Amino acid sequence: MSTRETEFLLPEALDLGSVADSLGPRFALAAESRGEFQQTFFDTFDGRLHDHGQTLVHQAGRLALVNGDGHSEIASDEWARSREKLLVADLPRGLLRTKLASVVDVRALMQLVRIRGRRRIYRVTDDQGKTVVRLVLEEPKLAGDGGALQPRVRLVGVRGYDRDLERVARLITKRLRLPIAEVTVQDEAVTRTGGTPGGCAWKGSVELRRGERADRAAAQLLRRQLLVIESNLPGAIADVDSEFLHDLRVGVRRTRSLLRELAAVFAPGPLEHFRDEFRWLQQVTGPCRDLDVYLLDFDDFRASLAESRAHDLDPLRGLLKRRRSLERRRLLRALRSERTTQLLADWAAFLDRLDAQTGPTGPAASLPIDELAAGRIGLVYRRMVKLGRRIDDDTPPEALHDLRKKGKELRYLLEFFACLYPDQVVAPAVRSLKSLQDTLGRFQDRQVQALLINSLGDDVRALDDGAAALMAMGQLIERLEDQEAEARAEFADRFSHFASRRQRAMMQETFG
């Protein structure tokens, strides 16, 4: 609760007279206004505002970003009408847009729930007739079907009368025994409509137990990734925002990683089939995602050039958008195909059999998961150290790319199985790995981006305004190559931390 506001739940059997009686003789209640209200709440699909203790509400022609209590405003702006979906870029420049962008980034803000109801506001006055607190009584309902939500009483402080606010809150709590509202009206409404407050049910880690059978643990982890894929599939098809396709691909990539690293848990026949099918799904979703990344990075591309050259890149943006439209059509055919539908259905059935131990399994299915995972983590770490030590200034770029891919395997293993091992070992390993991966990722991204932009030269040259764009592209490629070189120069320092004697000793002691 805000220090300036306190909200109580109001039982239906309790009338306003009882509230007034609870305040006497020190305070009196006087009507100030009454009316109806409508509110529409927004958040991202993955609940980023909720995770930050915030919500976005549209009411009376304004959009307001408020704290988790639903009332303490952070920023607001005029917004004539509510929509099903909002992008931060749609909003006028100002504090609201800036605050939202820092939390939601490129995610769409989607309509969660709409409520309506009656609101009555009363002045709480002291023995001198001064207004010291305002009491707001709200009787909300779900919009549409009109299902009633819990009535609420909110105490709003008046500047300079904080002690009176505390006294009124104590009187209501003591004499009426009203419970403080622990759940916001937004979360209550979302729950009533079948949603999950805070977004996706797949957020958070799977809690495994030491000694648990490896096949059962694998089924839990893989079922979570299936939930990620299936939850993001509709949004990827509808193109709500670019993160749906990204998260779908992360679910596929993590599934493939588990199938590789826990291969001994599975029977060879089904393993080969599913590895082939998930590889296909990863491949067909890649081109559209790559173009999404280029377009998301485009403003940074422009900012890296001299101001006089920045707008010369606009033809390149248009070309990338046209290519994305083409790849989107191919993507949609793949995601809507019988092959994808059958893959996900067959995979769900396979996981059910794996969890129930009713189908064929591999030689490691009955091993304790902590024993199997430790062996894989230790092996992948040692391979990374071996690969990294071979890299010097003359090593081909492919070696750094291979190390990055192996680093993803290790990162996923550490995240999947972190709950089974000491945090003082896992946390430093993840930090040093993340630092190394950031450098390797920047190296690869800049190299790939420079190659792609260079490959588009002939297409841009054919455009009416292509000459200026080609010159700007040349400068951009130089910037990208400089950043690629900077990342490569960082590698030795980042790798030395990852493969330090102390780090190797901890990994050896814990994972063998």
Image (cartoon, helix red, strand yellow):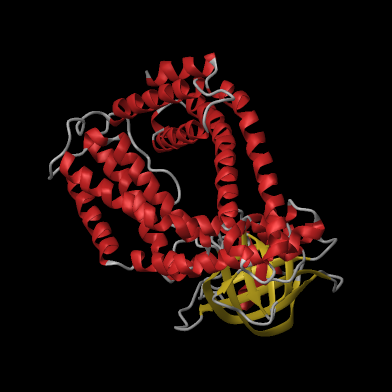
Quarter of the image that includes the N terminus: bottom right
Q: Quadrant of residue 233?
A: bottom left
Can residue 199 be seen in this snapshot?
no
How many labels sit on residues?
A: 0
Q: Residue at x 42, y 38 (%)?
A: 412
Where 294 sits versus 462, above or below?
Answer: above
Residue closer to the observer: 248 or 168: 248
The quadrant the C terminus occupies is top left
Residue under the image location 63 percent in, 39 percent down: 484
Q: Position of residue 366 (x, y in %)?
A: 19, 31
Residues 219 and 143: in front is 219
Please indicate whether residue 460 sits to the left or right of residue 221 in the image.
Answer: right
Is 310 located above or below residue 507 in the figure? below
Report x, y in % for residue 331.
40, 64
Q: For residue 186, what is the image quadrant?
A: bottom right
Name the side, left or right, on which 74 lies relative to 508.
right
Return the residue nearer the eye: 26 or 122: 122
158 or 221: which is nearer to us? 221
Q: Position of residue 285 (x, y in %)?
A: 41, 57
Residue 248 visible at all: yes
x and y, in percent, of residue 179 in the image: 55, 61
